[in-house]
């Protein structure tokens, strides 16, 4: 369906812009985060297989996890990352939001370790997190259902 592809393209463009701004300026524009929420609302009207409950739960879960990290480690996770998490969770739904969270933290940890090992960054140097959140969200958006089904299939 054309609408789904337009939604996907808009999602990719917005995530690219968010990542680019975060890398360059270490901030995440609220307007771009809001656009993800708008896309999430639009996606509920397409055959996305997601309910409003799943969207709200996804937003609440992802937002809450990053808010907890933001409060537990002041200065480590920015408020923009927390707001972006809520928007991504709403757009993806709760299952894909959890997958996105796991993928973003795994990717961030691997790249962080590599940058520290190569002495490009120090342990206390900030690393923009939005690109990792974008990567996790993209993988979850396009392949999340298959990854989740594969993972759950390992148990039964």
Image (tube, rainbow, N blue to C red):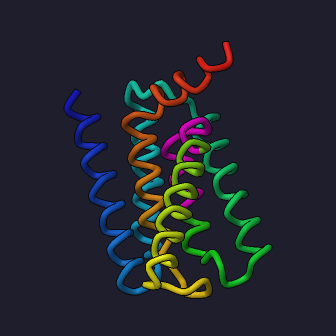
The location of residue 70, given as percent across then percent down, is: 71, 73
Question: Looking at the picture, does residue 37 appear above or below residue 43?
Answer: below
Determine whether, in the image, residue 4 is placed left or right of residue 96. left
The location of residue 71, given as percent across then percent down, is: 77, 74
Question: Residue 105 sits in which quadrant?
Answer: bottom right
The quarter of the rendered structure image containing the N terminus is top left
Determine whether, in the image, residue 100 is placed left or right of residue 42. right
What residue is at 62 percent from the left and 50 percent from the top? 59
The quarter of the rendered structure image containing the C terminus is top right
Q: Which residue lies furthest to the top in this view?
A: 156
Question: Residue 55 sits in which quadrant?
Answer: top right
What residue is at 61 percent from the left and 67 percent from the top? 82
The location of residue 7, given as percent across then percent down, is: 30, 43
The stretch drawn in magenta includes residue 29 = no
Q: Give the main secondary structure of the magenta stretch.
A: helix
Of residue 80 and residue 126, the one placed in the foreground of this image is 126
Q: Which residue lies furthest to the right in this view?
A: 72
Of residue 76 and residue 58, the one placed in the foreground of this image is 76
What residue is at 23 percent from the left and 42 percent from the top? 6
Q: What stretch is highlighted in magenta?
A: 85-97
């Amino acid at each position: 369906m054309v609408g789904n592809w337009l939604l996907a393209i808009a999602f990719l463009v917005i995530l690219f812009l968010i990542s680019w701004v975060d890398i360059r300026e270490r901030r995440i524009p609220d307007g771009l985060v809001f656009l993800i929420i708008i896309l999430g609302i639009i996606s509920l009207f397409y055959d996305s297989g997601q309910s409003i409950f799943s969207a709200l739960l996804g937003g609440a879960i992802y937002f809450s996890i990053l808010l907890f990290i933001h409060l537990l480690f002041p200065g480590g996770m920015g408020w923009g990352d927390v707001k972006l998490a809520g928007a991504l969770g709403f757009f993806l739904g709760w299952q894909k939001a959890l997958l996105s969270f796991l993928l973003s933290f795994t990717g961030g940890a691997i790249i962080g370790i590599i940058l520290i090992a190569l002495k490009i960054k120090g342990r206390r140097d900030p690393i923009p997190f939005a690109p990792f959140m974008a990567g996790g969200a993209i993988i979850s958006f396009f392949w999340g259902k298959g990854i989740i089904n594969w993972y759950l299939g390992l148990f039964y």
